[in-house]
Amino acid sequence: MKIIMLGAPGAGKGTQAKMLAAKYEIPHISTGDIFRANIKNGTELGAKAKEYMDKGLLVPDELVVDLIMDRFKADDCKKGYILDGFPRTIPQAEALDKALTAVGESIDYAINVEVPDENIVNRMSGRRACVGCGATYHIKYSPTKVEGKCDTCGADLIIRDDDKPETVLNRLNIYHEQTQPLIDYYSAKGVMKEVDGTVDMNDVFDAIVAILGE
Ligand code: AP5
Ligand code: MG
């Protein structure tokens, strides 16, 4: 099964993708997580990506496409995958289509997690990320057992550099300009499904599972 998670920054793509990956036993591939891991490890790719990410801008298509094509070669992608944060532009979607068509495959579902802009800034200011394993929490909606420490690995929690309100607004603008057109793109292919992302995260999950099947 090949799934694309669509939605504004902070809509809950990562939260849902992690739960879906565990249920369907396919990898969760987040381009944002891959870039953040590269920044943490001080790689050349990380340094390039950080310039754009800190401003709330998109990393250039060619960097992202090369990275994803490389990731698809791994053995764990044979049964499918959940793409979170890719594609994010029409050229990225076209590059993905071209690569899949070349091997006789296609995307099964694109799931749009719908959350209005007014909810987003509030959500992002409460998000906390683990420096160790990358788990995501929210101070109000998904708090840790011990404040400031990850439930899974015990490492410290941080606020993402791009979660400052002014950067979030930039990210939202870029989302509307460059990523939202993908909703029409995947609707035209007949694979687009929408879920309400404003309800409890477990209810969002149930709605997605109802679409994908048990
Ligand atoms: P990326 O990491 O993909 O960020 P994003 O799309 O902006 O999305 P987020 O990760 O911020 O949000 P999310 O939808 O995953 O929400 P989450 O589950 O965490 O990309 C970062 C940057 O990398 C981009 O800006 C760009 O520069 C670059 N980049 C990445 N991919 C790229 C690409 N393909 N091309 C070019 N550049 C690229 O949830 C948010 C918060 O809400 C959490 O605290 C969570 O606990 C909480 N929450 C989740 N669900 C609910 C709920 N139902 N109710 C209440 N709270 C909830
Ligand atoms: Mg995410």
Image (cartoon, rainbow, N blue to C red):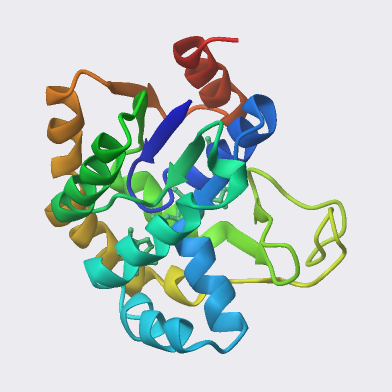
State which quarter of the image contains the C terminus: top right
The count of marks equals 0
Residue 17, by quadrant, is: top right
Using the image, determine if residue 111 lies above or below residue 83. Answer: above
At 26% from the left edge and 39% from the top edge, which residue is drawn?
A: 102
Residue 31, by quadrant, is: bottom left
x%, y% of residue 108? 36, 23
x%, y% of residue 79? 56, 31
x%, y% of residue 115? 35, 37
For ligand 1, which image quadrant applies? bottom left
Using the image, determine if residue 179 lies above or below residue 211. Answer: below
Q: In the shown orientation, is residue 133 left or right of residue 95?
A: right
Q: In the shown orientation, is residue 112 left or right of residue 158?
A: left
x%, y% of residue 16? 55, 36
Q: In the shown orientation, is residue 61 left or right of residue 147?
A: left
Using the image, determine if residue 210 lies above or below residue 120. Answer: above
Q: In the shown orientation, is residue 173 left or right of residue 119?
A: left
Q: Name the residue nearer the viewer: 203 or 108.
A: 108
Q: Name the residue nearer the viewer: 92 or 54.
A: 92
